[in-house]
Image (cartoon, grey):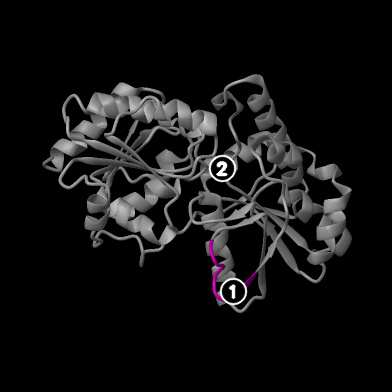
Amino acid sequence: MCNSLSGSIGVDRVAYKQAESLAKEGNQVTIFTFMKEVSPPKGVEVFQLSMPKGFYLERFWRILFPINIIALGLYLPKLNGFEVVYSHQYPLSWLAYIGKKVFSYKYIYYHHHLNPPEAYQGTIQQTYARLLNGLTLWTATRADHIISISEFSRKSLLDAIGRDSEIISNEIDAERFHPNIDGKFVREKYGIQNSPVILFVGGLAPPKRVHLLIEAFYLVKSDFPEAKLVIVGKVAFDDYYQKIKGMCDSSVIFTGYIPDEELPYYYAACNVYATASLWEGFDLPAVEAQACGKSVVAFDIGSHSEVINPKNGRLVPANDTKALANAIIEYLSKSGQ
């Protein structure tokens, strides 16, 4: 179970990989999701649940899902017959829990991360994040087993609810993410040719702190005037997107959604991968970038000290945009830009 089946969100990509692996082992697998953007893995069925459209309406609906008798009546019977149900996100974790009580299957909660309320602006958004975290943790406490994607993720959950979990780190597809990839078509597509390129991949939401990355980028431009910042990701919060877009000139390129199969070419096209994220349970794009042979610069937060290899990665103090910029400049200088 995951809220969306897409190629652009880390949680979704982990759920997709898990479903693919389970199917290859001979299991009958069905993905329950609210939104389907990509085809499922071979041999995997998809059951799509309905959810209202609209930024605030969708969020209001998620918070009230536990008392949505109509939704439970429609979807609960679909869980009959399963032996194990994995849930990667709330509100589907609530459905998984109720189904466990009715049908007695094994409910496994997959813990990725929580939304840091302090990352959001305004009382409404911060309150929503706190409520979402509370409901997520409530359903996690009722799981038969919990899997966390990193030691940081495990510790954060242990501190929050007092339950330990098994660590299963996210896997990188070595057949897709490796150093021998040609990113020429990406550079040609955006007309960046031989310019130094800094890349970020992730949803455009406040916890990703893209505005701090943009601030660091303009410090980098003092040493590398021709540098480009390529930001790959869907708009999760339109007000935040408008804010960061207003900070930029043409040297910052927003690509929007990129199909998952094209991501390796974006990593190949960059000189440095950089992120200013405030909170990461794993940070799949940073690890994929390193697998493609790229240097990574990030804040020393969350799981970064676990998953980013120091051989070609640099962690700097959180929120220190100058340190972030200096590390990027150092890597660009070493790459001969």
Find residue 75 and report its horizontal and vertical position in percent.
Answer: 81, 59
Query: Bounds of the magenta span?
Result: 38-45
Asked if residue 162 shows in the view, the reply is no
Is residue 123 found left or right of 12 in the rendered image? right
Q: Badge 1: how crowded within 10 Å, few (<14), some, or many (20+)?
A: some
The residue where tag 2 is placed is: 153
Asked if labels 2 and 1 touch by Cβ distance under 8 angstroms, the answer is: no
Query: Which is in the foreground here, disc 1 or disc 2?
Result: 1
Find the distance from the CA under tag 1 to the CA under tag 2. 26 Å
User: Tag 1: residue type?
Assistant: Ala
Find residue 332 and report its horizontal and vertical position in percent.
Answer: 18, 38
How many marks do you count on the picture?
2
Using the image, tell me which numbered label, if any, was put on residue 163: none
Question: Could you tell me which residue is drawn at 67 percent across and 75 percent down?
Answer: 28
Q: Helix or strand or loop: what does disc 1 sit on?
A: helix
Q: Badge 2: how crowded within 10 Å, few (<14), some, or many (20+)?
A: many
Question: Could you tell me which residue is drawn at 22 percent across and 52 percent down?
Answer: 188
Q: Helix or strand or loop: what does disc 2 sit on?
A: helix
Find residue 329 and report its horizontal and vertical position in percent.
Answer: 20, 32
Find residue 171 and report its horizontal and vertical position in percent.
Answer: 46, 59
**In the rendered image of this protein, does residue 270 appear above or below residue 181?**
above
- Taking the view exactly as shown, the residue that stands out farthest to the bottom is 26
Q: Is residue 43 magenta?
A: yes
The C terminus - image quarter: top left
Using the image, tell me which numbered label, if any, was put on residue 23: 1
**In the rendered image of this protein, does residue 72 appear above or below residue 305?**
below
Is residue 120 found left or right of 309 in the rendered image? right
* Front residue (pair 103, 228): 228
User: Tag 2: residue type?
Assistant: Ser
Is residue 95 found left or right of 263 in the rendered image? right
